[in-house]
Amino acid sequence: MSPSNTSLPPRSHGGTPKGKVPLKKKKKKSGFKTFLKFVLILIILAVLAVAGYAGYLYYKADHGVLDTGVDAPVAPSQSAKVKPITMLLLGTDYRPETKTHLSDVIMIAAFNPDTKSATVVSVPRDTKIELKGYRENKANAYYPNFLADEKQSGIKATDEMKTMFSKYLDIDIDYVTVLNFQAFRDAVDALGGVDVTVDKNMCYRDKADGTDINLKKGEQELNGKQALDFVRYRKSNCRPRTDASDDFDRNRRQNEVLHSLIDKMQTFKGVTSL
């Protein structure tokens, strides 16, 4: 049979027969792209989880973050609805450089959950206390003395302070809490700083304990170190000198910082920082 007379179609030489759609080769999936998608999904899930937890914290704050306490029954006469809960707040000047314990900040806070109110009173550190059974001294000197006597007396210094100030102020103090310099700085930093109005330029330096106070007058947000400088400032040794402050100025600043901290604690950012 002659090749020219065959009725079979010619063989293909790499071309595609007419009327047929060429088959597409399946591309191999990129392992790197798959990995990126997996990471992206993890990130989205993490963001959703954080957002959900933050929402839960906000809900807890909105429904009373401070609604905590002891479930055990208390005597009717000790109910917070009858007698507000009272706390003695002591801010000591302790730091590793000095190892001192003078209670330069003394506040008495009364909380009434029934009326949802609080009253805070500051006692100037240089207040001279004359009280039966105690040696006459400045208010801020008692806590370090009680600490020194703990081993001999067997009574905690905080309990001694609670008893003494209960007699001095003629009120029943339920609790005592003590904060030192570092704890104060940490608390302010944990809440992202405090918003205050610095009432005057403040400059004071002490190489012995590393004190370096340098604040300018005006409204501003202070970090932990600056907030501590703000409440501690008393006098200036710089040139030019800045105006001095007395204990009443310091007490007012302490209250301003305390209120600013309370405001911060009630914000969304404050709650998630706790």
Image: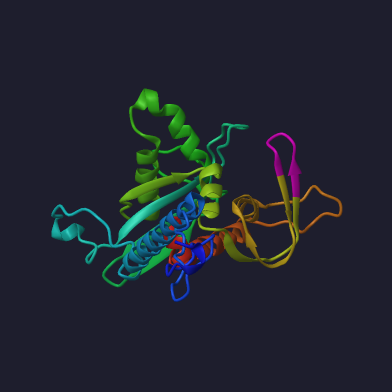
Q: What residue is drawn where x is 35% and y is 40%?
A: 159
Residue 139: image location, x then y, percent: 51, 46
Q: Is residue 167 visible?
A: no
User: Which of 266/54 is in front?
Assistant: 54
Q: Left or right: where does residue 25 sit relative to residue 66? A: right
Q: Is residue 208 above or below residue 211?
A: above
Q: How many marks?
A: 0
Q: How is the image coloured?
A: rainbow
Image side of residue 235 versus residue 179, left or right? right
Q: Residue at x 17, y 54 (%)?
A: 71
- Please tell me which residue lies in front, 9 or 219: 9
For the view shown, which residue lies furthest in the top direction?
152
Q: Position of residue 67 (x, y in %)?
A: 28, 62
In which quadrant of the rendered view does residue 146 lie?
top left
Residue 253 percent location from the top left of the image: 59, 61
Seen at 57% across and 58% down, the residue is 193
What span is colored magenta in the figure? Answer: 204-211
